[in-house]
Amino acid sequence: MNWFQKRKKAVDERVLNMQNKIYREIYLLIMGICFLSIVVKMYIFNLEPEQSITEFIILLISGIYYTVRATRLGIFSDEVEIHDRNCKIPMSSKNVYFGLGFGLLMSLFFGVRSAIVYGDGYGNTIFTFVLVFFVSLMMYVPFFLIVIVGPFSAAKFASKKVAAKDLEDDEE
């Protein structure tokens, strides 16, 4: 006799899918509110970024949690595959482009800022910009590529491994 064993109840898939859709909308709404709160605090109320640390933590932890959870369930690689099937540019290429773009933008920002702040005269300003731009480019492009592409590739690999293990368990 299994008195303490939970019984599986019949679940209406339509209701379950609608609940999941609502949860997804709530997640996006909360992320939007956190982002809006950061923007309002920093640009309208002129508060320091430290005043928005709670919102930064919520945005960061929720993204990390979703990635880890999807990877452990083995659906991350399936999501990437669906994305790649529906879009012209594969997700891995987009991540490389984002890494290159962020590195380039950071390098441009620091190059222009250094040229304005430390450049004395036309020739020195151009030299300062070029020097800071290329040094920043050599630092930030690899950094952002590693930070963006590295975890994505690791999560995709781990997710494929979990999905393959689940398929092997189902066959037995």
Image (spheres, rainbow, N blue to C red):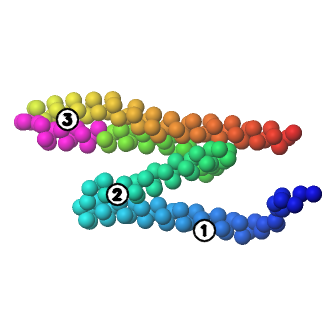
Foreground of the two, 154 or 138: 154
Above-or-below relation of 3 to 136: below
Tell me the kind of residue under disc 3. Answer: Phe
Question: Is residue 109 on the magenta stretch?
Answer: yes
Disc 2 versus disc 1: nearer the observer: 2
Q: Tell me the magenta residue range.
A: 107-122
Q: Earlier in the sequence, mark 3 or mark 2?
A: 2
- In the picture of the structure, the residue carrying the numbered disc 2 is 52
Residue 22 got which mark? 1
Dominant secondary structure of the residues highlighted in magenta in the image: helix
For the point 67% across and 44% down, the residue is: 74
Question: Is residue 59 on the magenta stretch?
Answer: no
Above-or-below relation of 142 to 102: above
Q: Quadrant of the N terminus?
A: bottom right
> Relative to residue 74, is residue 60 drawn left or right?
left
**Label 2 environment density (alpha carbons within 10 Å; few <14, some 14–19, many ≥20):** some
> Residue 107: horizontal and vertical position, in percent?
29, 38
Tell me the kind of residue under disc 2. Answer: Ser
